[in-house]
Amino acid sequence: MNWITILGIISALAITLSIILLYLLYRMYKRTLLKPGFGGKATYFLDDCESEKNCSICLGRLGTGLVIECSCGKISHKDCALLTKMCPYCKKSFNNIKARPAEIAKCPSCKTVLNGSVCACGEVYRKRDGTIVCTCGNIIDASRQLCDKCGTFYGKDGKITVLSECINIKRES
């Protein structure tokens, strides 16, 4: 074998290894994008549960009170349903339908009840419209990542950092 053949084989191996490495890096990148929560494409949104949806009669948030679900799928407050006595969409009577508590948002990771977008385990869940309910109650745009009211910073990885803690860390170092 001459040196040109050896050089060709080495070049082919280098190109093959480069392609394999790029493929592995791409897979790791895709895996981080598909991770549920704030950082990537969420598989669970905060407004997927009934307690975050709106009443089909008064259009107010259902909350954690009693609700009535019509056979057509519309959900409304028990009080609204008792006032109207029938579904405004399909005109069926609410007389034989029993009230039940609204389903409350729970963290898919640890199964604790969510109070806003942030779970006690640290996971952050956004709403379908791209907003986050901050721990202070302020509604912020997920693309801004910073709460103007309390200074909480929501990083791309879904981790929470209070801005005052960042400033203290920088002062110490």
Image (spheres, helix red, strand yellow):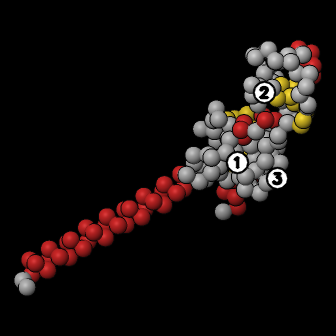
Which of the marked residues, 2 or 3, is nearer the chain's N terminus?
2
Which of the marked residues, 1 or 2, is nearer the chain's N terminus?
2
Q: Residue at x 86, y 28 (%)?
A: 68
Question: How many other residues sit within 10 Å of disc 3, few (<14), some (14-19) or many (≥20)?
Answer: few
Check the image and report above or below for 123 versus 45.
Answer: below
Disc 2 to disc 3, C-alpha distance:
30 Å
* Residue 44 appears left or right of 88: left
Question: How many other residues sit within 10 Å of disc 2, few (<14), some (14-19) or many (≥20)?
Answer: few
Q: Quadrant of residue 90?
A: top right
Please tell me whether mark 1 or mark 3 is closer to you in this view: 3
Indicate the quadrant containing the C terminus: top left, top right, bottom left or bottom right: bottom right
Q: Quadrant of residue 49?
A: top right
Check the image and report above or below for 9 versus 89.
Answer: below
Q: Quadrant of residue 98?
A: top right
Point out the residue furthest to the bottom here.
1
Q: Measured from the top left, where is residue 108 in percent x and y?
A: 73, 52
Which of the marked residues, 1 or 3, is nearer the chain's N terminus?
3
Give the label on residue 71, or none.
Answer: 2
Q: Measured from the top left, where is residue 86 in percent x and y?
A: 85, 16
Please tell me whether mark 1 or mark 2 is closer to you in this view: 2
Whether pointer 1 and pointer 2 mark residues with C-beta atoms closer than 8 Å, the reply is no
Q: Measured from the top left, where is residue 44 in percent x and y?
A: 67, 45
What is the three-letter code of the residue carrying label 2? Ser
What is the three-letter code of the residue carrying label 3? Thr
172 or 105: which is nearer to us?
A: 105
What is the three-letter code of the residue carrying label 1? Val
2 or 43: which is nearer to us?
A: 43
Residue 108 seen in render: yes
163 or 142: which is nearer to us?
A: 142
Residue pointed to by mark 3: 112
Residue pointed to by mark 1: 124
